[in-house]
Amino acid sequence: MILILLSFISVWMTGKELDVLSSNMYPVREYGAKGDGQTIDTKAIQATIDKANANGGGIVLFPAGQYISGTIILRDYVTLRFDNGSILLGSLNLADYPADLGLVYLADPYVWRGPLIYAEGARYIGIEGNGIIDGRGTRENFPPLPRELQRPGLVRFTDCQFVNVKDVTMRNSACWTFHLRHCEDVAVRNIILNSNVNRNNDGIDVDGGKRISIIGCNINSEDDAIVLKSFVREKISDIVIADCILTSTCSAIKIGTETVGDFENISISNCVIYGSRGIGLYSVDGSDVNNVTISNMSLRNCKSVIQLRLGNRLRPYAMPKDHYITTPGRIRNIMVSHIQATGVLDSQDFICGMPGYLLENVELSDIRISYYGNGTMAQATREIPEEIRTYPKIGMFGDLPAYGFYIRHAKGVRLNNVRFDYLNPDMRPAIVLDDVAGLNISGCMLQGGDTPSPLIRLQNVHDAVIRDSQPLDGCNLFVAVSGKETKDIILQSNVLKKVRKTVELGKEIKSDAVKEIGTVQ
C-alpha cells in the first residue's frame, strides 16, 4: 500500500479526487482521542492505528494538541504524522506500559519493558512531522534506582523492515530513547533528540540490523548519542551516519560496548561533536569490527577524540550456552581521516589490542588535534595495565603516557599528515607505541618542548618508517627506542633543525636496529 502525502499533492486535486485520497488519512480525534493534556488517549490512538492497518495502511494524524498515552503499537503500512503543535506525552502510570510486551532482556539489571511507541515484525512503517514525542521520563516520574527495570523507553522497533523516521522531536525518555532492534532498511533523517532527564538516556541505539542510515540529526543525550550494539550473534552491516550534530556526557558515536555479533561496512562522516567523549570503537565480546570509515569530523571541548579497543570481556548476555563466544574478536581495516579537534580536555586517545590479539590496518590521516596538556613526567613513565576484561571506556587505563595517541598491540598502523599540539606545557611524548608491527609515520608535525621525554617513543616496535616529520617548536629528543623486539626502524628525511638529539637507543637495542637517512638538521 502506498502512503499518500496529501500535503504535497492536494494543491492539484479537488472534489471527489481529494475525498478518495482522504481515506488514507486517519486523524486520531475522529476515533476518540481528546488531545487535551488530561485524558489518557491510548485506546483511541491504538484504534486509529488498527483501523488504518485494516484498510491497507495510511497516515495516522495527530493535529495540534497534547495526547497522553501509554504503549501504542505501530502496524504494517502505517505512518504516524505529528502536526505542528502536537505533542505525544508518555503516561506517568507505569501500568500503561506492558511488562510483557516487547520485553527486552539485555543483561542484569537491564530489562526494558514496553516503550511509548512499539512495533515488532512490521513493514513499511514511519514517524514524521514537526511535532514532539515526550516521554516525561524524569527521575522524579521514573526513578532510576531501585526501579532499574521499570523505566519505559520512547520508541522501539524490533525486527522491522522499511522504516522511515524524519523531522520529529524526541525528548525526555526514561531510558533508551530510540531503539532499533534487528531492523533492516531504515532511514532516520533530520530528527531532533534531547534526552537528559534520567539514566541510560542513549540517543539512537542500533542493536543489530542492516542497511540503516542516520542523517542530519541533532542529538543531545545523557548517555551515548549514537551507538551500534549487538547482543546476539547477528552481523550489523551497511550503516551510514552522516551530517549530525552530537553531544553527550558519554560517547558521541560508539560501537559497543555490547559486541557479540560482527560489525562491517560502516561509514561515519561530516559530523560536528561537542562536549562529549568523542568516538569509540570497541570489540570486547568476541565480535569482528571490520571496514569502518570515519571522515570529515569537527570536535570541540571533548574529553577525547577517538578510542579503539579490542578486549576480552566476553559477556554471554541472554544467548543459549552453545552460542557463547570463548575467544576475542578482531578490529581491522579502520580508516580515520580529515578530523579537526580543539580544546580536547583529556589525553585519552588510544588504539589498543591485547597481547597476541592485534588491531590490524588502522590508518589516521589529515588530522589536527589540540590538547589541553599539563601532563607530568610521572604520567610519561607510568606502566599501563592491560585491563583485558575491563569495561571499555575513556580512562580505563588511567593516565596515559602520551599527550596525543597511545598505540599498543597493533599491526599495520599508519599516521599521515597528523598534527598534535597542546595549550599548556606537557611532559609526555606526543605518540607512544608499544608492541606494534608495520608502522608508517609520515608528514607529521608534533609539539614537543623542553622535556626529557622524546617526541615519539617506540617500544617493541619493528618494521617501522618515520619520515618527513618534525617537531613544531623543537625538542630535546626526537625518537626513543627500547624493547627487545625492536628492530628494522628507518628514520628518513625528517626535519630536525631544532632537535638536540635524533634518536636514543635502549641498552638492549642493537646498533643496527635503527637506520637514519637524509635527516635535515
Image (spheres, rainbow, N blue to C red):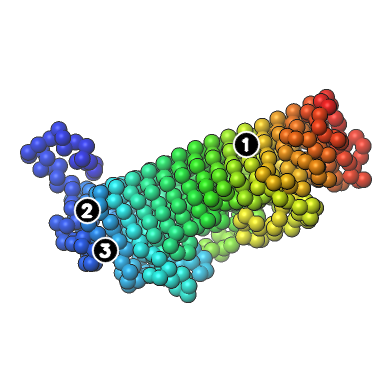
| SS class, disc 1 | strand
Q: Who's the residue at 81% across and 45% down the image? A: 451
Q: Position of residue 1 (x, y in %)?
A: 23, 44
Q: Is residue 108 left or right of residue 477?
A: left
The amino acid on which the numbered mark 3 sits, given as a three-letter code, is: Ile
Decide which of 504, 438 is in the foreground and name it: 504
Q: Position of residue 283 (x, y in %)?
A: 60, 52
Q: Position of residue 86 (x, y in %)?
A: 25, 54
254 w.r.t. 456: above or below: below
Nearer the camera: disc 2 or disc 3: 2
For label 1, the crowd category at 10 Å Cα-Cα, with few meaning under 14, some 14 to 19 and many 20 or more, is many
Residue 356 visible in rendering: no
Q: Which residue is mark 1?
A: 367
Residue 378 visible in rendering: yes
Do the numbered discs 2 and 3 sit on residues whose CB atoms are within 8 Å?
Answer: no
The amino acid on which the numbered mark 2 sits, given as a three-letter code, is: Ala
Q: Who's the residue at 49% across and 41% down the image? A: 271
| SS class, disc 3 | strand
Q: Is residue 505 left or right of residue 298?
A: right
Q: Which mark is residue 64?
A: 2
Q: Who's the residue at 60% across and 51% down the image? A: 303
Q: Which residue is mark 3?
A: 68
The amino acid on which the numbered mark 1 sits, given as a three-letter code, is: Ile
Give me the C-alpha separation between circle 2 and circle 1.
Answer: 47 Å
